[in-house]
Amino acid sequence: MAELQVEIVAADHFVWSGPAKLVKARSVDGEIGVLPGHVPMLSVLAAGDLEIEPISESRFSVQIDGGFFSVDSDRVVIVADNAVLNNAA
């Protein structure tokens, strides 16, 4: 099974990393949904919730205050201005 390697960091702290099936976020241009095999991209994120569906955990969300979203070779890196891990979504 293909998977994404996801890393989420805030300006001043580590938030989460691990394998995932799906990452959803809101960019300044609209909503982004990323599955394994997604084309490379770089986007500016709007404030809101990221939604992560890990391989072996329950789906959860992360509240962010904007930042950047990068996808390349099934690796997703999210650098947020500020980020707070929420309970299961």
Image (cartoon, grey):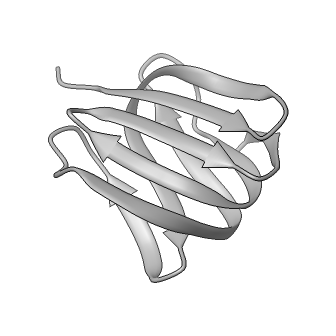
Provide residue 79's location: percent of width, then percent of height.
62, 44
Q: Is residue 89 visible?
A: no
| Residue in front for this viewpoint, 10 or 15 | 10
Residue located farthest toward the bottom when viewing the structure as drawn:
29
Quadrant holding the N terminus: top left
| Residue at left offset 40%, top offset 65% | 32
In terms of image quadrants, where is residue 76?
top left
| Residue at left offset 14%, top offset 41% | 37
* Horizontal relation, residue 36 to residue 69: left or right: left
Provide residue 31's location: percent of width, then percent of height.
45, 73
| Residue in front for this viewpoint, 12 or 63 | 12
Provide residue 42's location: percent of width, then percent of height.
37, 58
| Residue at left offset 54%, top offset 79% | 28
| Residue at left offset 18%, top offset 25% | 2
**Where 54 sits versus 48, above or below?**
above
Provide residue 11's location: percent of width, then percent of height.
78, 41
The image shows a total of numbered marks equal to 0
**Where 48 sits versus 79, above or below?**
below
**Where 14 sits versus 78, above or below?**
above
**Where 16 sits versus 60, above or below?**
above
| Residue in front for this viewpoint, 61 or 8 | 8
Q: Is residue 23 visible?
A: yes
* Horizontal relation, residue 37 to residue 41: left or right: left
* Horizontal relation, residue 51 to residue 65: left or right: left
